[in-house]
Amino acid sequence: MQSFVAALLNSLDIALLLFVIAVGLNIIFGVLHVINFAHGALYMLGAYFTYTIVGILGLPFWPSLIVAPLLVAAVAIVIERLALRYVYDRHITDSLLLTFALLLVIDEAVRMIWGSSIHVVDPPPLLEGTVPVFDASYPVYGLFVIAVGIAMILGLWLLFTRTRLGRTVRAAAIDRDMAQAVGINVPLMITGVFAFGAWIAAVGGVVAAPMRAIGPAMGDKIIIESFIVVVIGGLGSFPGTFLGAMILGLIHGFGGRFVPEINLVLPYIGMALVLLLRPQGLMGGGARA
């Protein structure tokens, strides 16, 4: 029972962190129709800005939850205005190649600024230690990650279904010309959506900073896992992102505990099965982000 509870909590922890990162990727695709390979690099920048705030400047962890995502969103605005907006009307492979190039550029910039060493951020004192959960003892910080993921799910659902801004974004995603005709500033909306997706990725980076080693390649692995999430769930589907993240979280949480020797290949097997049986994803064609 103890092992099962620990594996379940680990699965939720991993799944909700993956959701936070992958949902930004899916929102950008749903509105801009761009596969953003640089999304992992923006997540990495969130972690590095957190390290700068906490590890170098010596400030508490909590301000980094606000400051780091805003800094990454500012970087995303520069990227969108200077580079990405020129490939919206081209074939999707052009945006994929451009964002992959941006990933490499950001990786090298990180090495130049922060070096190639591995950095660590300690969790805030309030979130240190463990607490009993049923028969298991679980880190308090892991429960904080779960809480952040749940808050993000509820916040995004309310934004896109219960606010005028969310409905405006959805309208621009469905038909940009019609949205422009009814007075929506589509170019500004597109820039805002890209910045918002980057902000979400950076929130994931901030939350992941005390959990994972911060290094120049930390965004590479997460972008692969994020693509697995959206492929399983369905590209552009908000519910699909949640479902894909939960499936991948369960694979990692239970696979890592009970079949660690094959855990690394299980996500790829799951993705391959989905592509063979349902190429559009489990919830492809459903509600859009």
Image (spheres, rainbow, N blue to C red):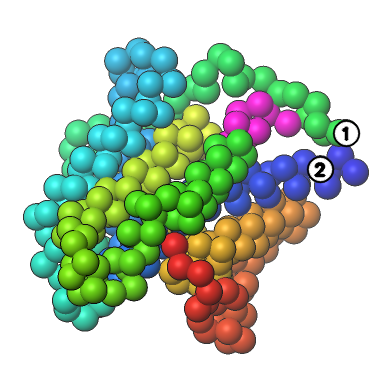
Q: Quadrant of residue 104?
A: bottom left
In the figure, residue 182 lies in which quadrant?
bottom left
Q: Which residue is at 31% across, 18% downward? A: 56
User: Up-down: is 91 above or below 69?
Assistant: below
Image quarter where the C terminus lies is bottom left
Residue at the image position 32 percent from the left and 48 percent from the top: 196
Q: Residue furthest front?
A: 182
Q: Secondary structure at mark 2?
A: helix
Task: Determine whether, in the image, residue 223 is placed left or right of residue 17.
Answer: left
Of labels 1 and 2, earlier in sequence is 2
Kindly identify which residue carries mark 2. 5
Q: Where residue 18 sits in the image (x, y, percent)?
A: 52, 51
Which image quadrant for residue 248?
bottom right
Q: Residue at x 25, y 35 (%)?
A: 71
Numbered mark located on residue 135 in the image: 1
Return the mark for residue 51. Answer: none
Residues marked 1 and 2 touching at CB (< 8 Å)? yes
* Residue 170 spot, x, y in % from top left: 37, 64
Which residue type does callout 2 highlight? Val
Name of the residue lying farthest toward the right: 1
The quarter in which the N terminus is drawn is top right
